[in-house]
Amino acid sequence: MKRVLSLFITIALLAGIMSGCGNSANTAGDTQGSSSAVISGTPSEDATNTDGLVKVDEFIIGCANHITGPTALTGVLRKNGYELGVKEVNEAGGIDGLPIKIMYEDDQGTNTGAVAAAQKIMSSNKAIVFLIDRSTMVNAVNPIIQENEIPTLFGATANSIDELNNDYFFRMRVKDGGNAQTMAKYLVESLGKKKVAALYCADTFGEGGNTETKKALKENYDMAPVTEQKYTAGTKDYAAQLLAIKSADADAIYAWGTNSEDNAIILRQFKELGLDKNMAFIGSAAYASSVTIDLAKENADGIYSIYDFSPDDTRTELQNWYKAYKAEYNSEPDFWCLSTYDQVKLVADAAKRAGLVKKIGNDYYIPELKEARAKLADALRETDHYKGAIGDLYPDDYQNMVHNMAVVQIDSGKLRLIENVTLDQ
Amino acid sequence: MLELIQLSVSALSMGFVYALTGSSIFLIFNAAGVINFAQGALLMLGAYIGTTTLNKLGLPYFLAILLMIIIMVIIGFLFQRLAYYPLRNSEGLMFMIAGIGILVFMENFVQLLWGAAPISVRPLLSVHSINIGDLNFEPQSVMIIVITVAILLIENFFLKKTSIGKMTQAVAQDKEAASLMGISVPVMIAVTFINSTVLAGIAGVLVSPKFYVSIGLTSLLLKGMASCVIGGFGSAVGPIIGGIIVGFTETFGARYISPQFRDAWAFLLMIAFLMIRPKGIFKERISEKV
């Protein structure tokens, strides 16, 4: 009996020791497995610090950006916006004292690259929020975002993203439907055009934009384009399409395209083939981007665009961003830089509202990754008229946060504000 | 009618660009029996060098082009020496693979030197548009036609009337016989590579004001190849006629059939030629290969 009791006590003691070691190992393993950046060093020995919290050095934001590939230039502009946001947040004390940092992965400007970049970021278990762009890439990473339940902010504008019904998606630019409505309204009501022609890129963006504009023209004005001309991105010559539009006797062109080279060639040929004498031209945002204007030069003058902002807009937040960008980078900012800047600022604001960061002693702690992401997502959903540089941010039913844009006209290479438009909610 | 004329001018200008590119491919194929997949990269590099000589150095237009040509001569020699010469006795596939590697390298190299942003280039003609009655023409399209005709005439003179040109043709026809005649085959192949590189560079500079300068220019290689396939490798005129056919096919195909498949029309025609008349319009003379 004594032997049995001794054996039992020994086994119990051993079990207790093993479970204690196992817990410690699991805790350490989890933290190391989760992130060596999220958790620096070992967990605190203070009981309150390990109560669902992990020690961190930085608030990590994951980002799939175009570092290489054909869209590398866009990647530079986006990063400028991101980093300006990071700089301002950290100079203002970070998130309750904790500095933020963006962890970039290269998406190479392709869907495959975007998926790989997203997977790499998720597997690092460091990022509390994820940033990405381009409608086709957002579609591509949708399953990864759903699986990891990570709040994701993006500037992609395709209407179809709403149909994914992803609770973790937060759109930070006006979607194509809204831009198309504004485009149609301006063409018909302000410019008085009656025979509009469509010119668009045969990709998700262009096809979607054309579909939405046609819908807006039909529903509101019972009009249809007199001709629809599309092209593949990278086409070097658009004479065929433009002469077809001329032949259709159109009095205006609405155009959807994101590639600055294509847009600049189109604008140049539009003028050189004499179409500008009798036709107005209104393009999607990329037509008024700094890259397009730099390439097209005087050929961009007189063109209208539905754009994210105008430097003429006197709103304090926009002017502060505009001046800060020019001071930081000594160049004219673009719509790419505006959305990305506000994405970072909004994340910081939401993280503060969620109370994610706790300072204990000299160390900073945030909840475990899953909980941190969930709290941040909730805070983003509860955003109540955050004053961003891009405008007044609040979520609609699909968590689209931006509800205003500008109609601009290019004049001597500058964007002249025609009118600010706020979408009906 | 007016539209037909405008379309034809546009088609002809594109056709001549493809003709220049195709001619540069033809020269190397004829001399060395290999397809140079780096030809698009050389065209792109010529365009980038042109942006520096024209925009940055601010030289008068023709002086800037001359400087670009001199630089391309050096690049052509180095390219032949470093890429072709070590592989000259290997299978043609080896050089083709090397060409692809050089193409990828160049696309990243130029972005490192000149940046990722596309670059606009000062055109020769600063007029906004060439107007003749109700017709409006793109100035650079007209310039491409005029300059390409001049270049091709000069090229023809070089090949047919100069001793070096005749020697390169002799090497292209029969290396062994040329060697026996005392012609240095390696030197003539080097001259051919230089000639081809300069042609590619000129093509790059010609299209720069029209297409802007970016890595996207390398795609002209495919149209150049289509020009060679359609025109045939039997004569220097082949790529020229082939290029014009490609230009008209894609322009009129885009206008009257489907604008979205503009590029497809030319390649469909190329496939049709490969199936029906693989040697092209100006086929190689069989007797030379016996």
Image (cartoon, helix red, strand yellow):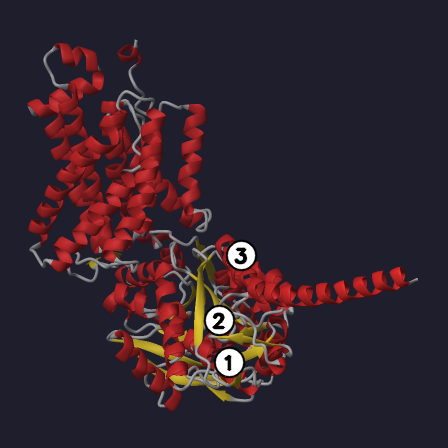
**C-alpha separation, residue under disc 3 versus residue under disc 1:** 31 Å
**C-alpha separation, residue under disc 2 versus residue under disc 3:** 17 Å
Query: From what the image shows, is residue B226 above or below residue B180?
Result: below
Q: Quadrant of the C terminus of chain B?
A: top left
The spot of residue A194 in percent (x, y) is 45, 73
Q: Secondary structure at mark 2?
A: strand
Mark 3 and mark 1, same subunit?
yes
Comparing marks 3 and 1, which lies closer to the viewer? 1
- The quarter of the picture where residue A339 lies is bottom left
**Circle number at residue A75:** none
Mark 2 and mark 3, same subunit?
yes
Task: Chain letter for mark 1, please.
Answer: A
Q: Which residue is mark 2?
A: A61
Comparing marks 1 and 2, which lies closer to the viewer? 1
Question: Dot 2, crowdedness within 10 Å: few (<14), some or many (≥20)?
Answer: many
Q: Secondary structure at mark 3?
A: helix
Tell me if residue A422 can be seen. Answer: yes
Q: Is residue B165 left or right of residue A383?
A: left
Q: Is residue A422 left or right of residue B154?
A: right
For the residue pair B190 and A223, the one nearer the viewer reads as B190
Q: Is residue A46 left or right of residue A243?
A: right
Q: Residue at x 47, y 60 (%)?
A: A227
Tell me if residue B125 can be seen. Answer: no
The spot of residue A327 in percent (x, y) is 26, 80
Q: Which residue is mark 3?
A: A115
